[in-house]
Image: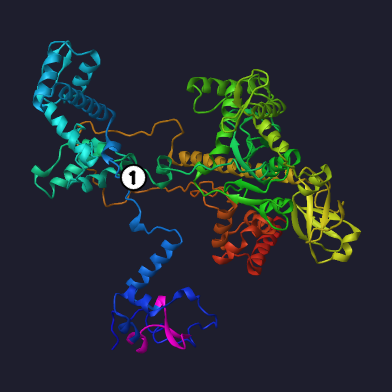
Amino acid sequence: MNNPDTKIGGNLREGVSQENNDQGGNQLADSQWLKVSEAAALLGISIQAVRKNCAEKKLTTKMIKSNGGEQYRILASSLPEAAYKKWCQQQLADIGYQVASQLPALRQVNQGELWATDRQKNTAHARLGVVKMVERIMATTQLGKQAAAATLLERAALGQLDEHSMKLLSAARDPRGRGGLLVDGYHLPSARSLWRFMSAARQEVLTGDSSALTPKVPQPDKQIPAWAKAFLTVYQIPSKPSVGAAYEVFKAAWLAQYPIGTLPTVHQVRRYLGKLGKVDCQTGRMLPREIKAMKVFIRRDTSKLWPTDVYSMDGHTFDAEVEHPFHGKPFRPEITTTIDVATRVVVGISAGLKENWMSVASALRHSVMAHGIPSLLYVDNGSGYCNAMLKDEVVGFLGRLGTTPTHSIAYNSQARGMIERVQKTLWVEGLAKRLPTYMGADMDRQAKQMVFKQTRKEIMARGEATTKLLPDWRTFWQMALDEVKSYNNRPHSSLGKIKDQATGKTRHMTPNEAWQKSVAEGFETVTLSREEGILLFMPEEVRVTLRGEISLFSNRYFARDLEQFTGERVRVAFDPYDAERVIVKTMEGRIICEALFEANSRDYFPTTFVEKAARGRAQAREKRLQQQMDEVGLELAAGRALGYQPGQPIPFEMPVSGEREILAYESEMPEQVEQVAIPLPTAPRKTCLPLDQLIDNDVDQYCYLIEHADDWTELDARWLMEYVAGGDYEFIADRYKFFGQAWNKELEDQALAVLQKNNLRTA
């Protein structure tokens, strides 16, 4: 067996000869091969012992010719670990490196000073000043320490010290001690205290620790009491009970298991909670989404961004009522805002009835045409941003622009604080609060009710949708544009500072000035021509051509150039506000032709996409109102069946005695009882959707209808056929397929059967 003290490197390095010292065929550097004498010095053994180890192949060696004979050369890495480490240190020292063990020791930092309060530090400095005063007396009078301290106090008592020295003596005194000598309003320390100060100062000189001069202050007890876990269990819950209420629950549970002597008082509980950190105390009372507002965060730096690198977009429900553009009734519009992250310029806005892909596309078009195409678009996960019209690789706006969408984490609005602050500055503080119809949280409740009633009263009295308080749509839109212009020309606190040429004072740059500064530094905007913008921002749908025709939103469009594309999938670009014509492209994006609305369409006049959406919204509202009317009819019918009219109390006689009476019923039936069945009217169901379950989006409605396919009505079947033909279904078709809810031929045949059955019944 080999000697473990001289064997290093394992089987891979044992017995390696000159012929196989490098598997790659490369020779190792000569500096790594040691003479026998050098190896002996590193190992601390004789040269003969080294030669013996080489002969026994305990070290990696090679033979070289020297002085007419052969000599060993030993590979340094094959030496034992201690010797090899020593050789490495010698090599580093030769080229100027210092080994860590030879570096100067780090200076010890007094951690006590870091935790001391200002009062403790001032007292420690005053005591050190008093020590210097005593040492000066000792040096000038040749007195000892005790005599010098007594002399200093005697001079202070006789009023022979200046005001600064008296303040030092008073500040050096420990206020917790017994009352010392009072001279001219200054409390003096005792002679024993001065001796203690001098001993502490000597210790600081010797050890560098000044904690002896620092007065001690009471420290909170950091031990966790035995009852803490039981109390926090009932205190740290989302309902956020008060300390008193949680203590009562804790008290009852504690006394059921432990003696009363172990029960803490409510004051002890409050003191324990005061020792906890703010976040630790609120853990459990606030769930992660809410407690995130108390935790640390990362502040994003935008100084390295250029304009149009990142656009941030978000929707905001306006906090004031304006006149509806269609019927003039009061409503709160949805404003979509886009800002440039680098310069804070509001690059585009749009206003609509709600946040959807059309309002998002309008704001994006405004931004791109006015300021340029962004590289990234930072948005949330709302339906207005997660849809095929925006994100689809074929028909989506962003794919055509070359813009990459990126979404924030759900329920993490702090990450989008920049656009949130802009929304508040522009639309709440800047515009909504200037209108009398402001409905926000800061509005006085009584004033809000008065304005609400006044606007409705004026509409009813005039018989038309115009009031003095409601701004019309054109006025509101112009005010919004003016507010954006004002915002872009106001100094912004997050931007750099410049000297104002008009006033000569230093101020922050405005967003427009920051944009111009980037342009002066070489930034070039990537923009679109008017024709490119119109074509790029036309929404698209994928359709199949048939004999030169294309069906889109119940309208048919025709072009002879489509005859050769029969049965192929094409992209159809349309204007939401003009249904007279569409532009047809190949799936690769090449324009085929312009298809025009034909007279054999379902409607004699074409229906635009906006009109179709408005019609669907009106039908849904009509359905909800009809359900309420049906409920009212059922309530009236039920009242007549009970024999009373609404608003009349039901007759009920109370026992005169006030005692509980038990009514005994005879087993015999009455002689003649005429039973009259009063049929209650039941309104026919137009849909199989439940009345006791909230279904307010297309995904939930589709899933419910698929699970209840046997209950479909005509309205349900028609809605399903239209939904699966649109882009919203295609966008999440994989999800439906994963859960076994995908649309198939069997479901389509069932829906067609429901529609045909209803048509036969109508005929």
- Residue sitting at 41 percent across and 75 percent down? 76
- Residue sitting at 85 percent across and 65 percent down? 565
Q: Is residue 747 above or below residue 634?
A: below
Q: Is residue 738 above or below residue 635?
A: below
Which residue is disc 1 drawn over?
Answer: 283
Element at badge 1?
A: loop
Image coordinates for residue 425, horizontal then vertical, percent: 58, 29
Q: Total of numbered circles in the picture?
A: 1
User: Callout 1: few (<14), some (14-19), or many (20+) C-alpha neighbours within 10 Å?
Assistant: some
In this orientation, which residue lies closer to the viewer: 252 or 127?
A: 127
Residue 224 shown left or right of residue 712 in the figure? left
Q: What is the three-letter code of the residue carrying label 1?
A: Thr
Quarter of the figure that contains the C terminus: bottom right
Q: Quadrant of residue 266?
A: top left
Q: Is residue 677 visible?
A: yes
Image coordinates for residue 144, horizontal then vertical, percent: 10, 27
Q: Quadrant of residue 207?
A: top left
In this orientation, which residue lies closer to the viewer: 652 or 243?
A: 243
Residue 410 shown left or right of residue 392 in the figure? left
The range drawn in magenta is 52-77
Q: Is residue 474 above or below residue 704?
A: above
Q: Residue 707: say if magenta.
A: no
In this orientation, which residue lies closer to the viewer: 717 or 47?
A: 47
Residue pushed farthest front?
67
Image coordinates for residue 243, horizontal then vertical, percent: 25, 37
Q: Residue 65: say if magenta.
A: yes
